[in-house]
Amino acid sequence: MNIFTFRDLLEHFPYRHVDKTSVNTIADINFQTEYIQVAGVLLNVEITGGKTARRLTAQLKDKTGFLELTWFQGINWVQKTLQEGQSYLVYGRVSFFQNRPQIVHPEMEVLTTEKQDGKNFLEPVYPTTEKLKARSLGGRQIAKLTQALIAQLREKDLPENLPPAIIKQLKLVNRFTAYSHIHFPPGIKEYEEAVKRLKFDELFLAQLRMSLVRSTRHRFSKGVIFDKVGELFNTFYKNHLPFELTNAQKRVVKEIRSDTARGRQMNRLLQGDVGSGKTIVALLSMLLALDNGYQACLMAPTEILARQHYETITELLDKLDIPVKLLTGSTKGAARKKLLHELMEGDLKILIGTHAVIEEAVQFRRLGIVIIDEQHRFGVAQRARLWQKAEVPPHVLVMTATPIPRTLAMTAYGDLDYSVIDELPPGRQPVTTVHRFESQRSRVMSFVKAEIDKGRQAYIIFPLIEESDKLDYENLMRGYETVKGYFPEPKYWISMVHGRQPGAQKETNMRRFIDGDTQVMVSTTVIEVGVNVPNATVMVIESAEKFGLSQLHQLRGRVGRGADKSYCVLLSGSKLGNEARERIRIMCSTTNGFEIAEKDLELRGPGDIEGTRQSGILNFKLADIVHDRSLLDIARSMALAVLEKDPDLVSAENLQLKEFLQEQKSPIIWSKIS
Ligand code: ADP
Ligand code: MG
């Protein structure tokens, strides 16, 4: 369980406390009951169900009735440890089987007379594992060890680490008290105070550390200097920009310019909704590098995307004489050798590519900026390798594919600077989104047909949660056959793309759709990110209830990219859970990615938000940035205020804070590496 030291044990927090004062009776259970604690005598312990549905069942009897207890796992061990006729205190989640209440895998504790007296205290319950339980290290034993540990600790062992002013302002209990009360609180109020204090510690220290990284970079990092806006940038901006930049784009370009001119390394996160025009910002940043005598690199997560960027950018730069090349896994032999040589000589100015650009053999002469598109697809180690490619670290611009709510971005990427394009280019027609049931499929297909007959193209997306999942795969194949039934050759041609295809085949099928040779694209979510086919105006999402919000938003972002009115149809089964219904409702009511991201955060919690999973910083033990949002805001503003007054933490009031930070081996802050 990752407990190696006394500190680890101390920070192995109970996930709840049993209130020994409130033992219910079995008769209290009704259909609304979720968790319950009851006490009674154990009867009829037996194994039932034969080979296939083997389980252990028992009855608990108190003076008001019987409750069924069931185990599916660890049957032999449970049977060995339980004793018929013994009184137990039983806790667990109530479920109903054939209208009778039962508890599956209840927590069981022998009821002693002392406990029956109902002493007034909250007993901690700790996470543990079946294996540990089998070796007598269940929750109760962990409680005993923790109790022994805390009894030996003195206040000096857990000295205060926060500045006194903050403690006073927030009325926080001291650190020592917090640690002992979170395990063994005298009452609910003391428990809550302890939790608040320790949550604040987590949030505040994380914010402080990341802000320190950021301010240290701002003050001391070395960075290549882009101090002039030169000929390429100006010529392109004045003569070849195909449209006027939106105000948001202008603002972000300005932020990047001032950030790269200072002689400090830029490490910036650029957020913008799908279609907000991040590519042109990337291009302008690269031209800035070139004007200052540096090379630039743009990295995309897939070959298709890299190629699309390459095509877009070479087209935009058509009138300017700038060497741009594409490097992917399929760049081989002499062409690759030549490219690498030109790169090393400095003749090649802009390199666009996939992971291939971070291979050992790829060496730049003077790399000035690296732009990473749709960053969450890149592993952390991969990003670190790019970083090592220059003596003075290149500027880094990370562009996200999915908007992340601001709070989350600030928390997960507090060490990065942050820009946002919060405005779409003018003239975009919002995609009309509707929800239809599968029973209406043929009407939906007629609609798709009408669009295709107008010369447009359509996506039909099937869920493939795990590319390896056989059922999903068969589902996709059946779906493909159905679609073929509606769109027969040779009047219509269909492309199909999924994760099981070899790369080259995927590429070809995609290509045919991009080139307009096929009208329908049947696909799994592999097309989710970035693909740009402006002629596609319909997106049908099959089994839409199975997709998460941000995924639906990403998928919908594939249409509405051209001048024509676009549509998104969410097809679903007739039975929808509450959350799925809510997701679909939100999708039909807004096209704003940031709004959707906020809702997603509320519905799912931070752990699942795309793009943050690898940001170790969200692994708080106690705090939860959705529920503890207001505490997070306070922690963040206090961390910033502390650093603003005392950036090196040298003043007397920050002394203990500084010592504490230095003492703790600092956790790796992953996002820093980008
Ligand atoms: P994303 O932010 O999703 O990467 P892109 O950079 O691919 O978006 O831009 C989406 C589309 O919008 C492109 O076709 C691009 O040419 C166009 N576009 C970008 N900025 C503007 C603008 N200021 N005015 C008009 N069209 C724009
Ligand atoms: Mg893009």
Image (cartoon, rainbow, N blue to C red):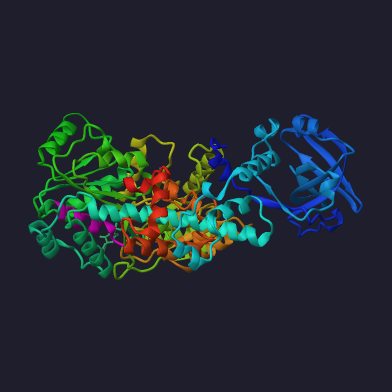
Hey, which residue is sitting farthest right in the picture? 63
The answer to whether residue 27 is visible is: yes
Which is nearer the eye, 578 or 486?
578
Residue 36: image x %, image y %? 77, 53
Residue 374: image x %, image y %? 34, 50
Which is nearer the eye, 588 or 94?
94
Residue at 53% across, 54% down: 175
The image quarter containing residue 30 is bottom right
**Quadrant into which the N terminus falls:** top right
- Where are the magenta residues, as a range? 276-289
Residue at 8% across, 50% down: 321
| Left/right of residue 348 with respect to residue 18 in the rendered view | left
| Left/right of residue 157 with respect to residue 149 in the rendered view | left
The answer to whether residue 494 is visible is: no
Which is nearer the eye, 644 or 252?
644
Residue at 19% across, 63% down: 242
Residue 282 is covered by the magenta coloring: yes
- Secondary structure of the magenta portion, mostly? helix
Which is nearer the eye, 84 or 309?
84
| Left/right of residue 508 with respect to residue 432 in the rendered view | left
The image quarter containing residue 470 is top right
Query: Does residue 123 sit above or below 42 in this rendering?
Result: below
Residue 562 is covered by the magenta coloring: no
The image quarter containing residue 440 is bottom right
Residue 121: image x %, image y %? 73, 54
Total labels drawn: 0
Residue 459: image x %, image y %? 42, 53
